[in-house]
Image (spheres, rainbow, N blue to C red):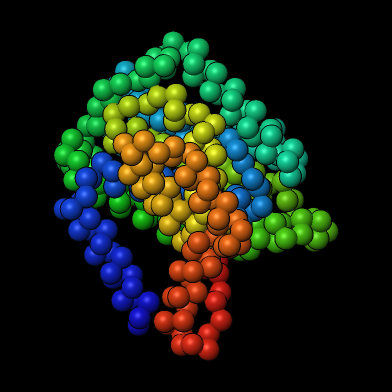
Amino acid sequence: MQSYGLLAVVAAVAVLAPLVIYPLFLVKVLCFMLFAAALNLVVGFAGLLSLGHAAFFGGAAYAFAQAAKVWGWPFEVSILFGVVVGAALGFAFGLVAIRRQGIYFTMITLALAQMVYFLAVQAPFTGGEDGIQNVPRGSLLGLIDLRDTITLYYVVLVIVVVCLLQIRRMVHSPFGHILGAIRENETRVTSLGLNTSRYKLLAFTLSAALSGLAGALKASAFQLATLSDVSWHISGEVVLMVLIGGIGTLSGPLFGAIFVVMIGHFLATSGLPVSLVVGLVFMACVMLFRRGFYGETVEYLRTRLLSGPQATPKADK
């Protein structure tokens, strides 16, 4: 009963938040929450550290902008096109990298993502350093006007919540259990007759599709797709979100995304080096919170409150 009460409080905060906080900032937070959750699907549950997810995030942003502005496609079709582009890039990356492990897999994803970045720099349709600007938001199904930022926030909120619930369902499904087994002991899973490469490729492609959805939603909100969306800095930033929040937990990356985005927003005009501050926080989390901030503190407190002082903390898996 107490857990339902906590969910009710979170839902109330999400619904009332745009009344006191700038809606576009909240949309940015939601997009990065989905992005972090998508990366955590392969990093935390499949054991695949990718530094190339910016290619899916930014590639889908460019795809959405091109479809919505140049081709004049409706909002929902443009979003779907961005997801398809992100999934296609993820499938292509996976075919090349998935049979490698450890640092080799990570470096291959980074190299492939840099190829996408240089393509975005050189391709004429991306607008180079100016990007694709003034992207129209249009309307959802021709009924809901997305030019109103509060309306846009609620639409994005519903989409992100549905995706997060699907990720949770996926993690607790037989497919998710197989991914966990691959992360723990891939050789043993192979000995059971399962094709681990196929499962990892599917997880990687799904993660890329969700990352593409996050990028397309961000491009629609800010009406802009730029090189920063496909830069390796975005890949590193979302990895930090996952690690700071709690790798391998369902809720940890969401808190990590909120923290990193808020730090970047509030320190942008302070004169302090944002990257240095985030780096110091990351070092502190690595040294003091081995399971991330959520895994070590929030989850521990929640377990104590819901189950009493004798309960032991358990990660939200």
Pick the front one: 159 or 5: 5
Is 114 positioned to the left or the right of 230 in the image?
Answer: right
Residue furthest front in the image: 271
Q: Residue at x 44, y 75 (%)?
A: 302
Is 267 positioned to the left or the right of 199 in the image?
Answer: left
Q: Is residue 282 visible?
A: yes
Pick the front one: 20 or 133: 20
Tell me the quarter of the image containing the C terminus.
bottom right
Classify 116 as above or below 154.
above
Pick the front one: 70 or 131: 131
Classify 134 as above or below 237.
above
**Tag count:** 0
Residue 261 rendering spot, x and y as whole percentages: 39, 45
Residue 292 rendering spot, x and y as whole percentages: 54, 60
Q: Residue at x 35, y 82 (%)?
A: 1
Classify 149 as above or below 163.
above
The picture quadrant where one finds residue 131 is top left
Residue 210 rendering spot, x and y as whole percentages: 47, 44
Q: Residue at x 69, y 33 (%)?
A: 108
Q: Is residue 41 visible?
A: no
The picture quadrant where one finds residue 290 is bottom right
Q: Residue at x 49, y 63 (%)?
A: 294
Residue 263 rendering spot, x and y as whole percentages: 39, 46
